[in-house]
Structures are given as structure tokens and as C-alpha cells.
Image (cartoon, rainbow, N blue to C red):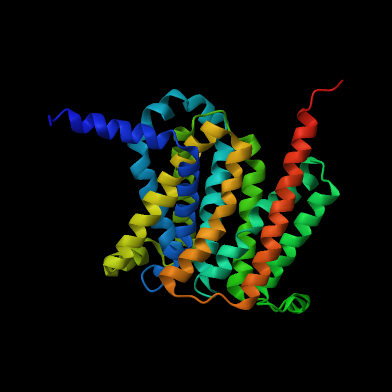
């Protein structure tokens, strides 16, 4: 075997992976689901603000050399769309993840994963309210079922508790996080016309900036963060390395490539795997128990998402159908 055989085989393997959209999109969901577990492992190592600051500052520094040529070529468009890029970085990247990491301190990772399933449904509701996207009766039923499932999780199987606002703090934080990410998703329609590499670099920059501001205003400040980082164990560094590389960069790349291959409508379905992977990893890696109320809630959530997705796609087919 010659030395030239190795890069050839490596190149073929890489090309083969990049041409498998199902695998790429599944990996994206797995890496994003693992973000919840990383938040749990970070407890005692870094607080949510510190973990977020480390994540986005390092992610920006890692991605910048690879994205530099794209950023330079698309700089004019990046400047024109700076407001929305800053919004995505501040709301969808930092605020969402600070709340998610904070929620891990107060509630089970299984709960966080299942509440995250509310995001696609909240996006559908937002599309109807803000942009008047048509909703059928089946669509509305699906949304109602999913919302009930989320309430069932957040109240630990006692939905009437929501009337007295008796909801676990961690579950409430995750509900707010889901709402923020749904808003982020809704306004992605205003995303500047730039490549995904420039998009990740620009939003990571604004995420890093926002996380530093959050750390200065609400956390222990730069000095406190440096002190916490110096005191981290090897486990803390593994968590930081994971959140920097996998959910922040690799998952974005595999998702972008998967959507490029099969389109956004089919690709978006894989987002629903995030809570599935998150819950499964919570059981396997954290030893959390799945209670009866989790199973009941899961039935409502899965049925609701399935109905809502089916209704949305049937509506899209009707819109695109050639008229006689």
C-alpha cells in the first residue's frame, strides 16, 4: 500500500459522509441533544453564564480562520444585515443556551429535552399569528396536543398546577428558552443572503460579544470567569470542548449540508429528534429515570407534532399544486 492510498481513501470516506443527508441531519440532532447533557456535567465547573461565554468566544476563534475568506467576500452584505445577525447571536444562540444551562440546575435533563419539543410548535403558532400562515383544523389540533404535552411535563403530571403558576423553576426557564428560540427561528426569514460559513462566523461573533456582556452584567465578571476556568477539572474542559466543537460548529455544518441536499422542508423534520436524543442521553449518561408522566406527555407531544407537521406539509402541497 502506498502513502497516496490513505488520503485517497480518506477523501472518499469524507465525500461519502457529506453526501448522506439522513446521517448528517441525524448527527446534528444528536450533537444538539448532547448540549443538554453538557449543561448537566458543567454544574460545579462553570455557571451558565461562564459556560456560555467560553462556548461562544472559543467557537468564534475556531471558526474565524476557516470563514475569513467568505466573510471578506460577503462583508458588504454582512454589514447590511448586522442587526439581524446580532439578534440571532444574542437571542437564538446566547439567551437560549444560558436559560437551557440554567435550567439544568433546577430540573431533570429529560424534562428539558421534552420541553424543547415545543419549539417547532411555537414556530408554527408564530407563523400563524405574525405572518398569517394558514392553519387547518388538523394543524390546530396538533398544536393543542403538543402544548398540553409540554404542560404535562412542566407540571410533572399535574396540569392543573399551571393555573396557580406552580411550575418548577427549571421547567419555566426552559419554556422561556423555547419561546426565545422560536422567535429566533421565525425571524430567520430576514437572514442576509450570505453563505452558511459567513453566517456562523458573524452570529458567533455577536454571540461571543453578548455572552461577555452578560458575564459582566449578571455574572462574576471577567476576573471571576478567569478564576473559574483556572479552577476547572478535566471534566470541565471536556464539557467546554464539546459545546465549542459539536453543537456550535460541527452540528451547524452537518445541518447546513443536509438541508442543502434534501431541502429545508424535509430537513426541518430532523429538529424533532433533538428532544428524543436529549432524553435518551439523559437516561443513558446521567442515569435519570423516566417517570409515568414523561411517557404520557411524550404521547401527546409526538402525536401533536406529527399532526401539525402533516397538516403543514399538506397545506404546502395544496399551495404548490398547479391550478386548472
Residue drawn 42% across the image and 67% down it: 220
Name, please, the residue furthest toward the left: 2
Q: Quadrant of residue 305?
A: bottom right
Please state which of residues 275 and 324 is positioned toward the viewer in this rendering.
324
Q: Does residue 148 sit above or below 269 in this rendering?
A: below
Please state which of residues 121 and 321 is positioned toward the viewer in this rendering.
321
Q: Quadrant of residue 54?
A: bottom left
x and y, in percent, of residue 274 in the image: 54, 55
x and y, in percent, of residue 197 in the image: 44, 34
Q: In which quarter of the image is residue 145?
A: bottom right
Asked whether, in this view, residue 160 is left or right of residue 246, the answer is right
Asked whether, in this view, residue 236 is left or right of residue 309, the answer is left
Residue 95 visible to the viewer = no
Name, please, the residue furthest toward the front: 1
Quadrant assignment for the N terminus: top left
x and y, in percent, of residue 136 in the image: 84, 46
Asked whether, in this view, residue 279 is left or right of residue 16, the answer is right
Please state which of residues 273 and 208 is positioned toward the viewer in this rendering.
273
Residue 77 visible to the viewer = yes
Asked whether, in this view, residue 80 is left or right of residue 20, the answer is right
Residue drawn 36% across the image and 56% down it: 242
Residue drawn 70% across the image and 47% down it: 309
Quadrant assignment for the C terminus: top right
x and y, in percent, of residue 199 in the image: 49, 36
Amino acid at each position: 500500500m502506498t502513502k497516496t492510498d490513505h488520503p485517497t481513501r480518506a477523501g472518499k470516506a469524507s465525500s461519502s459522509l457529506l453526501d448522506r443527508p439522513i446521517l448528517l441531519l441525524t448527527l446534528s440532532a444528536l450533537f444538539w441533544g448532547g448540549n443538554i447533557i453538557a449543561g448537566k456535567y458543567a454544574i460545579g465547573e462553570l455557571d451558565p453564564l461562564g459556560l456560555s461565554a467560553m462556548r461562544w468566544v472559543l467557537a468564534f476563534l475556531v471558526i474565524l480562520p476557516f470563514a475569513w475568506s467568505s466573510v471578506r467576500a460577503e462583508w458588504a452584505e454582512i454589514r447590511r444585515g448586522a442587526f439581524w445577525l446580532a439578534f440571532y447571536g444574542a437571542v437564538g444562540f446566547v439567551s437560549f443556551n444560558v436559560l437551557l444551562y440554567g435550567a439544568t440546575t433546577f430540573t431533570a435533563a429529560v424534562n428539558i429535552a421534552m420541553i424543547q419539543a415545543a419549539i417547532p410548535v411555537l414556530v408554527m403558532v408564530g407563523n400563524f399569528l405574525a405572518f398569517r400562515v394558514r392553519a387547518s383544523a388538523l394543524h390546530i389540533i396538533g398544536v393543542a396536543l403538543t402544548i398540553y404535552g409540554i404542560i404535562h411535563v412542566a407540571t410533572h403530571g399535574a396540569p392543573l398546577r399551571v393555573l396557580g403558576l406552580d411550575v418548577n423553576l427549571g421547567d419555566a426557564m426552559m419554556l422561556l428558552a423555547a419561546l426565545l428560540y422560536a422567535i429566533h427561528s421565525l425571524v430567520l426569514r430576514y437572514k442576509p443572503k450570505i453563505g452558511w460559513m459567513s453566517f456562523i462566523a458573524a452570529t458567533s461573533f455577536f454571540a461571543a460579544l453578548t455572552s461577555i456582556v452578560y458575564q459582566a452584567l449578571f455574572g462574576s465578571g471577567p476576573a471571576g470567569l478567569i478564576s473559574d476556568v483556572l479552577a476547572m477539572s478535566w471534566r470541565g474542559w471536556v464539557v467546554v470542548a464539546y459545546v465549542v466543537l459539536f453543537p456550535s460548529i460541527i452540528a451547524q455544518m452537518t445541518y447546513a449540508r443536509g438541508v442543502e441536499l434534501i431541502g429545508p422542508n424535509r430537513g426541518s423534520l430532523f429538529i424533532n429528534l433533538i428532544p428524543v436524543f436529549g432524553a435518551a442521553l439523559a437516561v443513558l449518561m446521567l442515569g435519570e429515570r423516566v417517570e409515568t408522566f414523561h411517557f404520557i406527555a411524550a404521547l401527546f407531544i409526538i402525536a401533536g407534532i406529527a399532526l401539525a407537521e402533516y397538516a403543514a406539509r399538506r397545506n404546502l402541497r395544496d399551495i404548490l399544486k398547479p391550478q386548472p
